[in-house]
Amino acid sequence: MKPFVGVGKEFLSVSQLLELIAKLATESSYYFWRLTHKVSGIKQQPPLETDFPMLEGQMFNAEYELRWKYKSNGRYDVLFLSIRGENSDFAIVGDTWQTQDRNAHLYSPTETRFPKSFNTVNLDLKQRYFIDSKTATVHFVALTVGNQK
């Protein structure tokens, strides 16, 4: 499949964002979100309406990552990074993407950057680089998963 980068055609309300997350979710999707006072850690369940407002979040699996970021008035902007080809829910950003998968380098359990360490024992986290093939510039780095450990 051809790599695809797309953005939301409009800002989404919380209910629209949750509908989009549910539409794109797979059994092997993982979630992470950031609030003003804490981070969720890597979860296997999507955020609930009670988790909002949040600053930003993401859903990822082996084929794509969906990112959302708070803009204003309870609305969120979304970015979709995929290796499954185009998705009509998003406006195309460029058309000369290529990807490279790399191992992810996680923070050690003793890292004090986060108040609680992330439990990734059964998760093979990787990074997927989205590269503009015309300029060889990496524009996006998406989280993805490899084989389960």
Image (cartoon, rainbow, N blue to C red):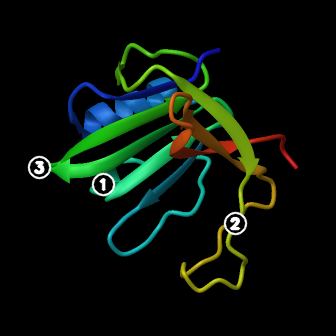
Q: Secondary structure at mark 3?
A: loop
Query: Which residue occupies the foreground of this view, 77 or 95?
Result: 95
Q: Secondary structure at mark 2?
A: loop
Q: Mark 1 touching mark 2, by CB under 8 A?
A: no
Residue for point 32% across, 71% down: 36
Number of labels in the image equals 3
| Residue 46 seen | no
Amino acid identity at mark 3:
Asn
Residue on which disc 1 sits: 52
Q: Position of residue 23 (x, y in %)?
A: 46, 24
Query: Which residue occupies the foreground of this view, 113 or 31?
Result: 113
Residue on which disc 2 sits: 106
Q: Quadrant of residue 13?
A: top left
Residue on which disc 3 sits: 73
Left or right, 25 with reference to 146: left
Query: Disc 3 or disc 2, which is closer to the eye?
Result: 2
Residue for point 56% across, 36% down: 131
Residue for point 56% across, 63% down: 41
